Image (cartoon, grey):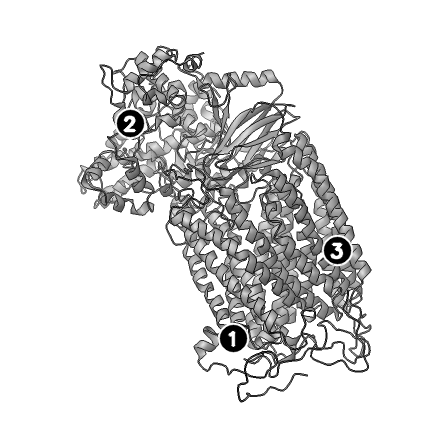
Amino acid sequence: MITRSRFIVALGLAILLVTSAGCTDSLNAGPLSYVDNDALTHELKGKANLAGKPALQAKVRAALARIFGESPQRIRVPENSGFPSGGLSLANFRQVGEGESARIEPIYHQLPDGRPDPNHRQTGGYGLYRRNCLHCHGVSGAGDGPTAAFLFPPPRDFRKGIYKFTSTPSGARPHRDDLTRTIRDGLSGTSMPAFDALMTPSEIQQAVDYVIFLSMRGETELALIEEGSISDENDTEALGEEILKELTAGVFDRWKSAQTQVMNPTIPRTKSDHESVIRGRDLFLGRTKEKLECAGCHGALAKGDGPSFVPVDVFNMVVFGGDPSTRPERVDALDETLKTLWNQKPDDWGNPLRPANLVKGVFKGGRRPIDIFWRIAKGINGAQMPAHYPTLNEAQIWDLVNFVLALPYDPDLLASPPPMPRPKLAEAGASR
Amino acid sequence: MTSQVETSSSAPVGHGQGDDHIHPAPRNMLSRYVFSSDHKVIGVQFLSSGLIFFVIGGLLAMALRWQLAWPWKPMPILSRMLWSDPSLGYQMPPEFYAKLFTMHGTIMIFFVIIPILNGGFGNFLIPLMIGARDMAFPRLNMVSYWFMPPAMVFISYSFLVEGGAPEAGWTSYPPLTIARWATPGSLNGQTFWLLAVLCAGISSLLGAINYLTTILMLRAPGMTMMRMPMTVWGLFVTAILQAFALPVLTSALVMQTLDRVAGTNFFSPTGLAVANAPAVVGGGGPILFQHLFWFYSHPAVYVMILPGMGMVSDIIATFSRKPLFGYKPMVYAIGGIAGLGFIVWGHHMFQSGMNPAVGATFMLSTMMIALPSAIKVFNWLGTMWGGRIQFTTAMLNAVAFVAMFVIGGLSGIFMAASPVDMHIHDTYFIVAHLHYVLFGGSMFAIFAAVQYWFPKIFGRMMNEPLGKLHFFLTFITFNCTFYLMHIVGMHGHLRRIADPTVYESLRNSGVTNMNQFMTYSAFALGAAQILFAMNFFWSLAFGPRAAANPWHANTLEWETTSPPAYYNFARIPVVHHAPYEYSVPGLEVDFLPQTKPLPPAAMLHPVNS
Amino acid sequence: MVVRNWSFLFALVAVLSVAAFLYAPFSPDWWLPNPHSAPGHSVSSMGREIDLLFIVILLITGLVFIGTQVALVWEAFTFVDQLDEQGKPKRAASYFHGDNRLEIVWTLVPAVILVFITIYQFGTWARIKYPSRNPKVPPLAEITARQFQWVMRYPGPDGRLHSPDDLILINDLHFVKNQPTLIHLKSSDVIHSFFLPQFRLKQDAVPGLTIPVWFDSDTAGSFELACAELCGWGHYKMRGNVTVHETEAEFAKWTSERIGEQNRDQLDLATDGEAR
């Protein structure tokens, strides 16, 4: 531990020159440059922006280059960013030596005889991202790769630091393991594939590092834009060193603190018997004193067609009814009520949102009881699913979990109230 | 020996074979060279638009090879200009790779090989070789060509629509093509692909009707069916294939178009939902499209090779100075290929989920279709046997056709064996096979035919040394490019994947080196075609004037001027004997044109083999 | 005479073509895909049959290829047109139109060979693909292809598919050595193709159909699953892992671990990230 922290002090500002180290690697060929956040240069309605403030824009760019590196090929690991091994796996370097004599060197793939093959440098998070993620998530992690426009749900924009499927408290940054699971297992029901068979576990960790790196960069950029939007263009002191430090520290701290805040249920899952499922159903239908409004979004039959959202066919018409570029026109063509409803319910990234159809048994954030517990207890960040803990106690949440997991196999649970006990459910309890 | 050209004939005496009524050529330049109903002009139009698209299709292939050799490495200049942007580091988006191979296949098949062989040479040669003044339906012929430009516009425009060009391969299997959100190219581009192929298909269909009528009705006096050159036989049988198979493709394309734009469900299974898009009612069958598609597209393989076989037969006989070995077996073989060609389509679908018992039946018919192909190869070898082989550029390309077609034919046997096909289906083995047939076969036949008939088409000779250099480089680099695909294919290299290094079994130095070697060879192969273009254009302008019969060949097209007059023949020729009477003992010259009556001193062997 | 040299060009290409296939068995990177430990050995019983058929066809076609190329090259060398000093051909071409006996011979001989090849294949084809010949075992899993992954649904402890205790995994196929294994292949969107290169097995997954597919392995280890039918922009990345377990017990242990993970309701913070 001591070695590592000393190492970070010694090389805390390691500039990892991917370009110079990996000329032979085709993944590193060609220039790659970050794309500015729209808010940096464009007038955005209702959002902080730096349109018309070129001096501040330049300051933001310079600050980002200084903290995170000028381009994806010149990664600078920010001090105190909390990356494991000092962020070396971003470009797959490793530490050689200890203490004062510590230096970094690239990791190579091994030849069959075990020697490192100097022609095949391992790519590290940056290279893995470039190869596997770039064409959807974009070079800056803005979810704007060339394939992105044709996907629904759209690829995540990392730059807010908000991730939907997390184990940390509502609104908090995700734990590394949340991102690991997402990359490893993919998100069922979306275009995010599982990379389990495409990357090794250590490679997935490198990719996680790079995703966090892009998030931190994007969050810092946003924070600077927000700070700049209330500053004067001609103020030479604006976005100065102190503020910068404060902002980045805030960004890093949010990530670091999330790593210790994973929500672990204090009581084990209730046995999934009929009684528990029925209790869960009653919670779902708002028949308990908590008066939950699950059915408002998920629908009375849990088919994802509740009245709080536009009807499914309207949604499909807008999202899938034509070219992605003409979607705003299709929204405009809706009648006033529908349009209002539509505009009320985007996610935090401004994308259309659809409540889950729970009958299908496809759970984007994972099908383990604990995954569903997290979804219910702490909601889905950035989406309209609220946190239900501590409104509900943990036992109640487990009842809901049991209900949700039983529903795909027994859709009559909602169709024919009150359902009679079924032997099938009793024997099929999940907590064995 | 060319008959004197008469300026015009007087009183029209009606139409029909043997009469000397001649229409004057149109004076208007537009109707003479652009909207022309002259089969020769239409032939040249098909040929030139085909060659232009050959360049486009070839360039797409270069980009494909780049990605396969160096996955995701930005291509200098082009990636910057055409398909990528800085935020992607100029690397190729994976869907763009799919666009490339889809368009490469579509263009090479529907816009290069079929139009050049059938539209180009078919139009130019059929009336000349059977001694007719024009096609039976000249206007229909013109319409047939003018269905091509809209097809070309549609296929090119598909790159520009939102989502870009189609990405479902030249086979366009639904539901990938009918689920609009399945992949960006299926959003809009696929519709334009369907329209383009529909137009190209109508063009071929109109041509086929015309060829059949012309060959059956307008043969010169004495030109019995069994006196027709093999080229005409090849084109005749091709036209039969087109006429009977194309309606099926057309209906399949219309059904797919309706599925896409009118909400029908011919090919979508019940409740199909792709990429989170809303589910369709469904009730259709995805495999149905494969049946319909291959019912045309397998015969289409023969559409692409039979005219080549015919032309190569002519060229080999001419330059061996010998009668074609086994004329009648050759004709029967072409007929056999056509007949069997209609009952083998299922071998494309061995792994498709079709009943395996049906697969076993198709295995037998597919094996049997190798037989007529083998007979043809043996007969070509027999033709060369004992000849005086003159290695002109045309002959070299024709011999290369035979050599390469043998490889393409033999590799087909692996695919025909359905258990072996289980392993090599959809791998590079099949890519190698189809390129040995379509490039090694059809393209070498096209090179040979251009070199051979260029004097007749344009009235000037092509440059022989340049042509031989082009042949030498093409033959070497072609084999370097495609032969190793057999090897990577049997090693499990899948076709249509943008990045082989995803798979561990393909992430080794052997496969990588082969991929890079094939890419270098492909670039060289592409560069070698510049020589062909140079030769073509240089000869067009500066080539020495061609005599009427520069190769001392027998068939009728050589009995008129080079280039032929508007009316082809001043007097409809009378045919006296079979087309391949070379080196007849007792004659002073080693050839005996079909129009020349047999001198009393000589005796012909009967063509009864 | 220089024109003769063209025959050497054709000879060169033919020789190199044969050489490539002669070299291939000696390089594991060139030959049919096999495990590193046994480069000449396909792991599945059907794979070994297919390899045999492949080699039989390779030999037959190789001999035909050599025969035709030798004839072609020899003709190109021997019968090339040679001119004497006066520019007259040294030799006249022979004049004949064919030979019926020869035609019959070279029609019948290939026909017999082709029929032989066909009949020789029938048994293997039937054994692999006919549903009536499938092993009579309960399915190991239902594999549903979707863009761009393989969803594997194992029946779980109750042995029944589509019950609440099903184990659902992505891109992870496990089975036991030396046991004929049956899966049900489906697709939830477009057409995919289930391809196990080391097993020589390929079967399209068609939406709307459930297709039984069986295979086995005589070697434990990890192999690859590929998608062989173009399925969209991500077709190339639709790779799955195949693990063949040495024993039934090992497989059972793996299954119960995976089911335990699927039923996880509390976090053991120390191990979660690595629990896989």
Q: Is residue C70 above or below residue B35?
A: above
The amino acid marked with disc number 2 is Gly
**Image-based side of A412 in relation to B580, left or right:** left
Pointer 2 with pointer 3, Cβ within 8 A: no
The amino acid marked with disc number 3 is Gln
The chain ID associated with circle 3 is: C
Give the residue pinned by disc 2. A299
**Image-based side of A189 in relation to B524, left or right:** left
Give the residue pinned by disc 3. C69
Q: Is residue B14 above or below residue B232?
A: below
Element type where label 3 sits in the image: helix
Note whether residue B76 is visible: no
The verdict on a common chain for dots 2 and 3 is no
Q: Label 2, label 1: how many angstroms apart (C-alpha)?
A: 70 Å
Residue in front for this viewpoint, A264 or A41? A264
Give the residue pinned by disc 1. B38
Residue B9: x and y, percent? 55, 88
**Image-based side of C170 in relation to A76, left or right:** right
The amino acid marked with disc number 1 is Asp
Nearer the observer: mark 2 or 3; the answer is 2
